[in-house]
Image (spheres, rainbow, N blue to C red):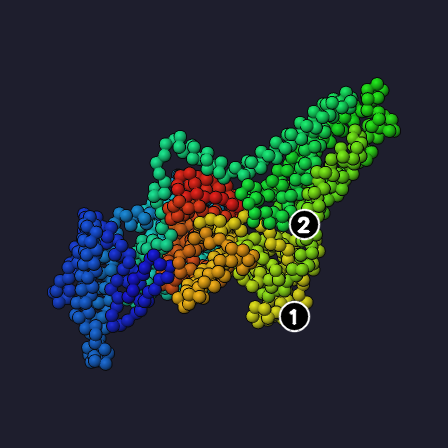
Amino acid sequence: MRTPSFGSSSRSFDAAECSLEQPPLFGGAMLPVYLNDLSRNIAAEEMVEVTLELDDNSVVLCSLAPANASSSGDDDQAGGFLARSTSAASRLRRMFSWRRTPSERTSTSDAAEDQHHQAAVVTARELMKMKAKMMRNKSTAQRALGGLRFISRSTGGESHPDMLWKLVEARFAVLAVDGLLSRHDFGECIGMGDSKEFALGVFDALARRRRLKTGKITKAELHDFWLQISDGSFDARLQIFFDMADINGDGKITRDEVQELIMLSASANKLSNFKERANEYASLIMEELDPECLGYIELWQLETLLLQRDNYMNYSRPLSTTSVGWSQNFSSVVMNKFLSVLLDNWQRALLLLVWACAMAGLFTWKFLQYRQKAAFQVMGNCLTTAKGAAETLKLNMALILLPVCRNILTWLRSTRARLVIPFDDNINFHKIIASAIAIAVVVHAGVHITCDFPRIARSSPERFALIAPDFKDGQPTYSGLLRGVIGTTGISMVVLMMLAFTLATRRFRRNGVKLPPPFNRVTGFNAFWYSHHLLGLVYVLLLIHGSFLFLVHRWYQKTTWMYISVPLILYIAERSLRTCRSEHYAVRILKVSVLPGGVFSLVMTKPNGFRYKSGQYIFLQCPAISSFEWHPFSLTSAPGDNYLSVHIRTVGDWTKELKRVFTEDNSSTCVIGRAKFGSMGNVDQTGLPKLLVDGPYGAPAQEYQNYDVLLLVGLGIGATPFISILRDLLNNTRLEDQVDSNTEASRSDDSSNSFASSYDTSGGRKKSQKTRNAHFYWVTREPGSFEWFKGVMSEVAEMDHKGQIEMHNYLTSVYEEGDARSTLITMVQALNHAKHGVDILSGTRVITHFARPNWREVFHKVAAKHPCSTVGVFYCGMPILAKELKKLSQELSYKTSTRFEFHKEYF
């Protein structure tokens, strides 16, 4: 039997097989590791000596040495214990003639041999039992207290027990009929309404203890049940868990009973695939806990497996935070925090300061300019205020186009401009400018309509004479001013802007506003997309509006066109380039895969000349669905791949229709979609709709090579940009391995390959090799999501011999580790990974954790592992987690020697 090396991701074990010749003395493949670990933790006062008197009056003495001895002494004594135990087993085998074969036995001696064999098997198990009891000290008991919780966070486990019981009483009053609570309502009553099958198992186990034959209980009996499941004692909770499987109450659990408990746990956690393989996992547990093949396990064996779970799951041991910080006084902490915030936000602050100063300068200049005009005598400060707001409005109407010129921004990201301009915040800046435009429109239009126009219409002839040259048709009326070119174009722009800005708000864009038909069509992404294009008409009206000013007559004084002409030309050129390029970048579909969780993937040909970086995204258009709609998707292929791939989640009308046109084919059941596959590239394109590609476009993650270490955090489908990065790192690793192998073969080959490897195949420029390590955290709600990138993760785990990439999967739909409903799943997961090196949920070597990560521990771990390094923290997902990650990045940057730089993108 080989014991595992927990530091390695690959584990190898010889399965404990049932044998009539030599039953294992110390359990399955992993049990000796636990027992040896515990033997080193026994206090001196806990030393125990066990004397076994055998049938032939011989004596075997087993003793456990104290833990306060020297390190070498501990090892010797622990080894001595195992040696003496093994010696005892050897004496047993010699005593019962283990080495005899059946052919050597007589028919008379066979029965005796069988009897001796059975006695030896039972004796071996008793030795294991005694050793486990001896080694269960305070430290292991303390670790166990957090496990097997029937009342957890999901059932309100954070509240005071008395308050929890009051909630249970309130539910009992609602659910009970004639003072009796039905067995089927027990789960809802105690707070397990979302896992009723598991709650039924708990009810039956507790009912067997009280010898209840009926399926209903009184309030007093419910209170008794509640006290048992909320008991703080681990032993009490363990006994209930054992009784759930021990249906006949004989104190023994068979393989079938283990399988039934696994199915209950799988149902509670909605793991259908796990439930289908319950038979296999039950055999795995029996193989580990019943190496003697007695056909049952007992309470102490289940306890041993639970207590040694940490040995199986050694991969995720958090690091101490004390190793990464240093002592600081209050003033230095405040100063470091200020410097950290300043370093993280100086680009944004500088950009906003320059922008605000430009607006203030323009407003002041125009305000003072119009105070010197004769019109000021008629309209006063209303005129100067309106004109100042108009000047800032012209500036912002020009600036608002630049953050959405994606091709220009993508190019600028590769220049030194990225050192000053925060390109990751382009959409935020776009929104800020839009807010400034809205304010300027309200001020400019509001002051004109409520102040300037009434004063012009009602001014005396003497005052109007001051501005009469500006009005060729005489003094206008108020209605005449509104019906004129200035009034008509101005009001039209206000209406169109109100419509576009309203539909662009988050609630309307995300269908947060529920309206009755047919008004519900003005909500959602499509309404936002089309209404935003109405702003093109606004620019036309703005040019007309600025050409018919009352108080300005010389062409060079009408500055509206000067402000917006260059940005408008750039934007039109941008859109024209996108149209022409998309026609040139028409692709062929190589593969369509329908994946769990409402996701499908498209693998396409890579157009000639298409160059991109990992982390970038593209726009897709399917003319068969809509000739106007373009939708962005992160690339999941790497720059070195000869194809493009995207993973698409069907969450809207367009994505659902795209999935339908590529996957539905009623003519045949042997094809996936309308593309017929044999292997990648063997596709029948008959009837396949055209797909256009536009891009690539810059994204925060594309700058990952600027950092020593990467911390990649993806929520659900937000993992897509990081899959491309993992692929790229993997391709670089392969290239380095090739170079290393060529170096050994030939020095000349080494020089040529080194030259080639130093250049990026996607762009021909020298690429950075700065990134040394990557930590990838993927948090998802559905276990089927692991199928999306299973191949990539398996490939990375196999090829990453240098330990460059560390991957962690987190499944939030499974109850947190320590909850009784996930305990058995955790046990099976640990056993299967220890024996086969494969996670039962992801199907890869990447182990799946339950519940959500402790992000503070994650950051401390990275900081401790990479001191004095710059860590790029890249997040893609919902906005809710971004605040926490950003805060931790800032906090750990001034608490440790590691600097964290946070980048985000939302989906």
Residue, x 33% and y 57% (percent of image)? 6
Farthest-out residue, left: 57
**Tag 2: amino acid:** Glu
Q: Position of residue 101 (x, y in %)?
A: 23, 77
Query: Which mark, residue 574?
Result: 2
Q: Tell me the crowding category of disc 1: few under 14, some 14 to 19, or many 20 or more residues within 10 angstroms, Cα based.
A: few
The residue closer to the viewer here, 904 or 780, is 904
Q: Is residue 501 visible?
A: yes
Give the percent coordinates (x, y) of residue 225: 38, 48
What residue appears at the point 46 percent right and 42 percent down from the top-left corner? Answer: 889
Percent position of residue 713, x then y: 48, 49
The front one of 289 and 751 is 751
Compared across the picture, whether 454 is left or right of 197 comes to: right
Indicate whether 328 appears above or below 632: above
Residue 635 in view of the camera:
no
Which residue bears the numbered disc 1? Answer: 667
Image side of residue 759 versus residue 471, left or right: left
